[in-house]
Amino acid sequence: MKPKIDLRAFAKWIILAVAIIMLSTWKIGAQTNVLPVLTTNYVMAVPYYREVNGQLYNTERSSLWKPFYGDILQIATNELIISTFTQEPIYQAVTVEGDDGIHIHPQLMSKNVVVGHKKVTGRKIILVHYSEDQGLATGQTIEFRAMRVGTKNYNGEVIEIWDYGMLHVAAVVTTNYPPQAKRKN
């Protein structure tokens, strides 16, 4: 007597055998588990972008920032005591020959000419975050822009605290993927 053949089981074995043969002859490229490389670069912004209390300011455009001239009175940790001043022009009257717009011929005219500047002492302030890398010395005159951030009791008098700001440094993170290997077909 002939054994009965289960056609369903036979078909499954045939399909499985064909699949094994196909997979063994099929060329599979090597898979590489390559992770991307993260690179962080730190870029310093232009000098007039400054941070005060975590906020970024453009010192040339913000109305909160004021220009100062000052003499350094005292250097302390992270702060300078500054005696501010302004420079007022000194005029002198001189006689010049010129056209006054009324007479046809040149006339002798009186004209004020700036011949110098006078230093007018202002208020005393505390300046914080000014760069100490510039070789500061007591008595040195500096020019700066700063933003008012508060007041402080200094030797019995309340004086304003002005912040020079810290340079803004931005972190630029880039993802670099390694180059793909060329596949041979």
Image (cartoon, helix red, strand yellow):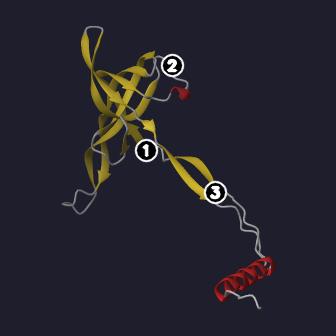
Residue at point 25%, 12% (across, down) = 157
User: What residue occupies the far front of the structure in this picture?
Assistant: 1
Work out whether mark 2 precedes mark 1 in sequence or the reverse, and give the earlier one.
Answer: 1
Position above or below: 177 against 2: above
Q: Residues within 10 Å of mark 1 (few under 14, many from 20)?
A: some
Q: Residues within 10 Å of mark 3 (few under 14, many from 20)?
A: few
Left or right placement of residue 86 versus residue 173 in this view: left
Query: Residue 31 appears at what percent x and percent y?
Result: 72, 66
The image quadrant that residue 127 belongs to is top left
Work out whether mark 1 precedes mark 3 in sequence or the reverse, and give the earlier one.
Answer: 3
Q: Can the viewer see residue 150?
A: yes
- Per the image, the residue denoted by label 1 is 48
- Per the image, the residue denoted by label 2 is 137
- Per the image, the residue denoted by label 3 is 36
Label 2 to label 1, Cα distance in Å?
24 Å
Q: Nearer the viewer, residue 114 or 95?
A: 114
Helix, strand or loop status at disc 1: loop
Q: Nearer the viewer, residue 179 or 49?
A: 179
The image quadrant that residue 181 belongs to is bottom right
Work out whether mark 2 precedes mark 3 in sequence or the reverse, and give the earlier one.
Answer: 3
Residue flagged by tag 2: what amino acid is it? Ala
Residue at point 70%, 85% (across, down) = 10
Helix, strand or loop status at disc 2: loop
Query: Residue 35 appears at what percent x and percent y?
Result: 65, 56
